[in-house]
Amino acid sequence: MNPDPAQAPQDAFRGSLAKGGGIGLIALLGGHAAMWSVLPSLHPLPAFLAFLTAPWIALLTLAAHFLRRRESRTAWGLGIAAAILVGIALLLLGLVVLVFSPGGRH
């Protein structure tokens, strides 16, 4: 059986890395900004845990959604956005440790 030619381009579309990266950065940064605005009204420990986990759960949900729609490149873009933010956080943490380390002073 020959597949329907009109359906072939839709099946071949796997999404876009740029689309996934943009959506991922917006989801993570926007999620953290929204949690930052809600943070003062919550108790300390649940607020901290929600601040850390809620945007990442949203990102995983978006990745599952795009994988279900067979847009694997968009899901990879979400992973790249997550890696970018983790890398930036690690760089900032390294800078803070470098600035405040007593080993550099004699």
Image (cartoon, grey):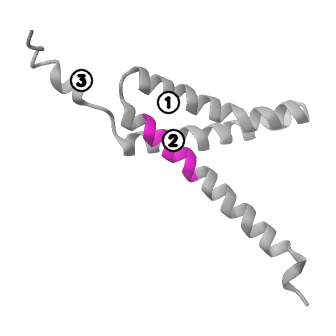
Observer-nearest residue: 49 or 42?
A: 49
* Crowdedness near tag 1: few (<14), some (14–19) or many (≥20) residues, C-alpha within 10 Å: many
Instruction: Give the extent of the magenta segment.
Output: 75-84
Label total for image: 3
Q: Which labelled disc corresponds to residue 79?
A: 2
Q: Residue furthest top?
A: 1
In contact (CB < 8 Å): disc 1 and disc 3: no
The residue at 74%/61% (across/down) is 93
Q: Is residue 85 left or right of residue 100?
A: left
Q: Amino acid at mark 3?
A: Asp
Q: From the viewer's perspective, is 10 left or right of 33?
A: left
Q: Which residue is found at the position 42% from the left and 20% from the top?
A: 68
Q: Which residue carries the number 3 mark?
A: 11
Q: Residue at x 64, y 35 (%)?
A: 55
**Which secondary structure, mark 3?**
helix
Secondary structure of the residue carrying numbered label 2: helix
Q: Which residue is mark 1?
A: 63
* Disc 1 to disc 2: CB gap under 8 Å: yes
Q: Amino acid at mark 1?
A: Ala
CA distance for labels 1 and 2: 8 Å
Tags 3 and 2 touching, CB below 8 Å: no
Q: Give the class, few, some or many, for how many residues have Cα within 10 Å of label 2's Cα (few <14, many ≥20).
A: some
What is the spatial separation of the Cα atoms under label 3 and label 2, in whole angstroms?
22 Å
- Find residue 57 and report its horizontal and vertical position in percent: 63, 29
